[in-house]
Amino acid sequence: MKLTQLALAMSATVAFGAAQAAVVPVGVQNNLSFADVTGVMGWTLTYQNSYGSTDSLANVFAGIGAGDMVMIGSRIHGTDVIEVAAAATLADIQTYTGQDQTHAANGSEWYYNGWSMGFAGLGLTIYQTSADVTSSSYTGSYPDDGLSRLSWHTDQSGPQNVPTMVIGGWRSGTNVWLNDSTDYDRVVFMAPVPEPETYGMMIAGLGILAFLARRRQAA
């Protein structure tokens, strides 16, 4: 095999390896298929429990590192429908924010304090009392941006604190007052870590391409 053909073959292998990684959506997503998320998109379900349940956040994000890409969302219980979801690194999801403050990451606005945690569409504001009640029946309206919101109650220790628990939920898009609901599940997915051999193939492919570039410059 000629060197240029080998380089093309290695590049194709790198591209194939990359295709095995999870497809990471940017911004808030609505009405995703659970089967597509775990199949076509390549994510792994790491946690699922009813909106009406209480869990430690250590359990919710068990086995996930700060730099890992995570998707959280709400699944309509017993169906294939993930009603609303968004993805970011765990470090971004767990960045502390003060009351009514958000932190932008991967096309969404994230918040995380001792009242509630969740996200809204990029550029939108939130109003915590204690969950994000913006664009809900609580404020008397359902504008479109309500579809891009997810809010889970946390410790109820106050927005000045970093949360340690998730206590039920409150909203999934424009569906609200879900505090004790068994009709919705909290779901957490993690993107797979590339296999070691994928890194090796990438390094080898980049080395060959660098060699070809140097040879062209010398010619």
Image: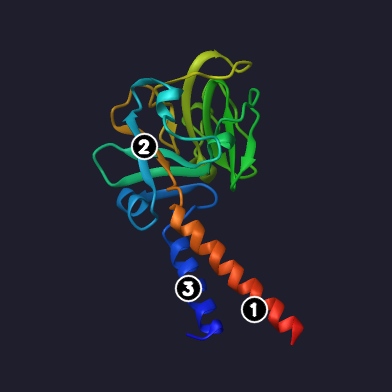
Give the total number of marks visible in the rendering.
3
Query: What quarter of the picture does the C terminus occupy?
Result: bottom right
Circle on res. 12: 3
Closer to the camera in the image, 205 or 105: 205
The kind of residue on which mark 1 rests is Leu
Q: Residue furthest right?
A: 218
Q: Quote the CA–CA distance across marks 1 and 2.
A: 43 Å
Give the mark nearer the N terminus: 3 vs 1.
Answer: 3
C-alpha span from label 2 to label 3:
31 Å
Find disc 1 in the rendering and name its residue: 212
Frontmost of labels 1 and 2 is 1
Dot 2: within a 10 Å radius of its alpha carbon, few (fewer than 14), some, or many (20 or more) residues?
some
Residue at the far top: name it: 157
Residue 176: give x, y in percent of width and height: 42, 30
From the top left corner, tell me how far across and down residue 21 is, in percent: 44, 56
Q: Which element is circle 3 on?
A: helix
| Callout 3 amino acid | Ala
Q: Residue at x 75, y 81 (%)?
A: 217
Separation (CA) of disc 3 from disc 1: 16 Å
**Foreground: 17 or 79?**
17
The front one of 193 and 132 is 193
Q: Residue at x 45, y 48 (%)?
A: 193
Q: Secondary structure at mark 1?
A: helix
Q: Is residue 81 left or right of residue 144?
A: left
